[in-house]
Image: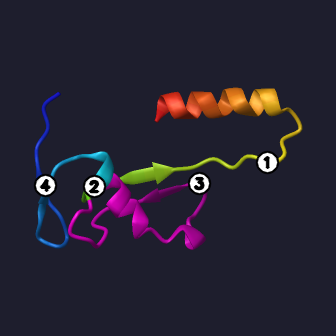
Amino acid sequence: MAYCGLTNKAGKTVVPSTEAFQAAAANADWAHAPGYHLILTDQPGEKSWPITGVSFILVYAEPPDPAATAEALKFFDWGL
């Protein structure tokens, strides 16, 4: 797959990678996330990918149907 490097807010050129996405997400304000997503454009950090978005789901720690929850989590793991 072809890709390009981008210059982030810190002025560093980064390539799209798991590390770069994690660096952007590490600076997210999760406590004030509206709904179930955040747009992480231009997050600080020398390794942050400048165009990142995330979403998350909530599940019960002790779900009423553990098998169904396990299947849903497998789906999200596959989708991401």
Picture quadrant of residue 2: top left
**Magenta segment includes 63:** no
Q: Which of marks 3 and 2 is nearer the N terminus?
A: 2
Q: Quadrant of the N terminus?
A: top left
Q: Mark 4 points at which residue?
A: 6
Q: Earlier in the sequence, mark 4 or mark 1?
A: 4
What residue lies at 26% left-to-right and 71% top-to-bottom?
A: 45
Residue 51 in sight: yes
Q: Which of marks 1 and 3 is nearer the N terminus?
A: 3
Q: Which of marks 2 and 1 is nearer the N terminus?
A: 2
Look at the numbered disc 4 and give the secondary structure of its residue: strand
Q: Which mark is residue 36?
A: 3
Q: Which of marks 3 and 4 is nearer the N terminus?
A: 4
- Is the residue marked by circle 2 packed among few (<14), some (14-19), or many (20+) residues within 10 Å? many
Q: What range of the chain is rendered magenta?
A: 21-48
Q: Name the residue under label 1.
A: 60
Q: Which mark is residue 20?
A: 2
Look at the numbered disc 1 and give the secondary structure of its residue: loop
- Is the residue marked by circle 3 packed among few (<14), some (14-19), or many (20+) residues within 10 Å? few
Determine the CA span between mark 3 and mark 4: 27 Å
Q: Nearer the viewer, mark 1 or mark 3?
A: 1
